[in-house]
Image (spheres, rainbow, N blue to C red):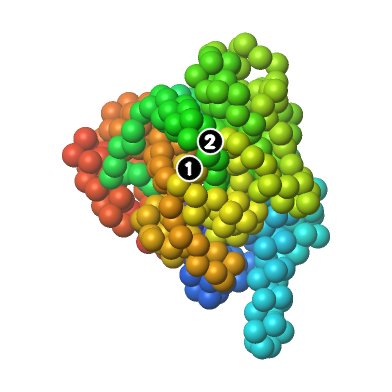
Amino acid sequence: MQITFSGAAQEVTGSCHILEVGGRTVMLDCGLFQGRRAESRLKNEILPLPVDRIDAIVLSHAHIDHAGRLPFLVKSGYQGNIHATAATRDLCAIMLADSARIQVKDADFLERRGQEHAEPLYTPDDAAQVLKQMIGLPYDRWFDVVPGVRALFTDAGHILGSASVLLECTEDERTVRLAFSGDIGRKGLAIIRDPKPPQHADVVIMESTYGNRDHVPIDDARRDLGRIVRETAARGGRVIIPAFAVGRVQEIVYDLHALARAGEIPQVPIYVDSPLATSATEIFEMHPECFDRSEDLVRAVDELFHFDLVRYTRDVAESKTLNAMRGPIIIISPSGMAESGRVLHHLAHAASDQRNTILVVGFMAEHTLGRRIVEKRDTLRIFGSHVPLRAHVEILNGYSAHADRTELLEWLDAVKLTSPEATRVMLVHGEPPAQTAFSAALTAKGYHCTVPAPGDRVTL
Ligand SMILES: [Zn+2]
Ligand SMILES: [Zn+2]
C-alpha cells in the first residue's frame, strides 16, 4: 500500500494524491495548480500518471484547486468513475464550465499576443464530460471504490457538499484506515453544518492552510457587517462587496437576511450582480440536506436566499443600470479578488465617493486590485484609468471558510486512532511557514507528523 503526493504538497493548490492498494490506483482530488500563469500552466499539463493506470477518483469538494484538472484528465482519456457528494457534483457543473471558459479565454489571449497556437487546457465540452462520469453519493454511507478500497464521506463543513473521506484499504489481509481531510471548515459557518471528523484513522492526510494562525470569531463578522451597512446607509452611500460567486456570496446574503429580519439593518436594496453567483445560489437551494438545522434562520424561513430586499441580476444591461440608482444600495459581485468581472465597473463608479464603502470579505492575493484596496492606495487603476480611492475601506476577516490552528487541532484529536502516538499525520495544502509551525505543534502533542514534498511516495 502506497500513497504518492502529486499536488498541494508544500503549497495550497493542485490538490492530488495517488493511493495504490492491491494493484489498483485511486486518485484523491484532481485540482488545478494556480498562481503565476506560465509556471502553473506547465504543472497543469503534466499528468501525474498515465490515465490508463487510474482505476477510480474520489473528490473532496468542488473548489477549482481540488476539482479543476478533472476536465483535462477526461480530455486525456480517463473514462472511469469520479465519486463525490451529490452537492459537489452539482457545483462542479457550474464551476468546471466557468473554469473551461477561462481556459479558452486565456488561450485566445496568448494567441493574440503572437505566441504560436495556444491550445486551451480544456474546453466546456470536456467539463461537460466530467459530469457524465461523476457519481453523486450521500454523506455517512460506505461505498465501494475499487476492490480492496471502500470509502465514506463525512461533512467537512467547508463549502456546500464538501467532504472529508475515510478510506478502508485492504491488501494481503491487512487493513489501513486512511482519512483524507479535504479542506476543513469552521464551526458556526453560515448555512452549512460544522465539520464532522472521520473516526479512528491510522493514517491522516490533512490540510494545514492556517496551521500557524487563529481567526476572529464568526459572530463578530455578522455584527460588523450590520454596523457597516448602517453607517454607509446613514451617509447615503453604497456598499460594494467583491466576493467569490460560490459560497461567499451566499453567506453574505444569508447574513444580510438574518440582519434584516432582526431589524439590525435599514431597508436597503441588495443586488447580487453575477450570473455565476445566481446559478450557484440555485444549487444551494437544491441541497437543503446540506443545511445546518441548528441555525435559527435555517429553521425560521423556507427561502434562505430570497427576501424582499434582495435581487439577482443576470444580464449586463441590468447590471449597468445599478450605477444610475440613487440612495443607499448594497452590491455583491465577483470576482472575489476584484481582478475581473462586473465588480470592476461598480468599483470604478463608487471608489471616488467618500460616502461609499468597499467591503473586503476574503483573502486578497498580492498583485490584485483587491490587495491595493486593502492597502488603501491613493488611486486605483481600473479599466486603464486612475480612480482616486476616497470611499471607506472595511475588512472583515471572519468569513474564512478554513479552520484555523485551534480548529485543525480539535479536528485531528477527534480523528486519531487511540492516542496521538498511534496515528501518522501527513500535512498537505499549506505553505511552508504554516506547515512548519503546525508540524511542530503536532509533534509536541505526540503525533508522528511529516510534510511530504511533491512526488514523495510513502508506504502505508
Ligand atoms: Zn476548498
Ligand atoms: Zn483547497
Residue 53's quadrant in the figure?
A: bottom right
Q: How far across and down, in percent of the image, does residue 152 sit? A: 58, 32
Q: How far across and down, in percent of the image, does residue 454 sit? A: 42, 63
Q: Tally the numbered discs.
A: 2
Left or right of 177, for residue 424: left
Q: Is mark 1 within 8 Å of ligand 1?
A: no
Q: Which residue is mark 2?
A: 236
Quick check: 49 above or below 196?
below
What amino acid type is highlighted by mark number 2? Gly
In terms of secondary structure, where does tag 2 sit? loop
Q: Tell me if residue 46 can be seen.
A: no
Disc 2 crowd rating (10 Å Cα; few below 14, some 14-19, many 20+) is some
First along the sequence among labels 2 and 1? 2
Which residue in the rendered view is the most extreme toward the top? 300
Q: How far across and down, in percent of the image, does residue 253 sit? A: 60, 31
* 441 vs 105, nearest the viewer: 105
Q: Which residue is mark 1?
A: 355
Disc 1 crowd rating (10 Å Cα; few below 14, some 14-19, many 20+) is many
Q: Tell me if residue 219 can be seen.
A: yes
Q: Measure how far apart labels 2 and 1 are at the Cα level.
A: 6 Å
Residue 139's quadrant in the figure?
A: top right
Which residue in the rendered view is the most extreme toward the left? 444
Q: Are marks 2 and 1 in contact (CB under 8 Å)?
A: yes
* 1 vs 436, nearest the viewer: 436
Q: Residue at position x 68%, y 47% from top?
A: 324
Q: Residue at position x 60%, y 41% from top?
A: 331
Q: How far across and down, in percent of the image, does residue 432 sit? A: 31, 57
In terms of secondary structure, where does tag 1 sit? loop
**Of the numbered discs in the image, which one, if any, rests on residue 36?**
none
Q: Residue at position x 55%, y 33% from top?
A: 252
What amino acid type is highlighted by mark number 1? Arg
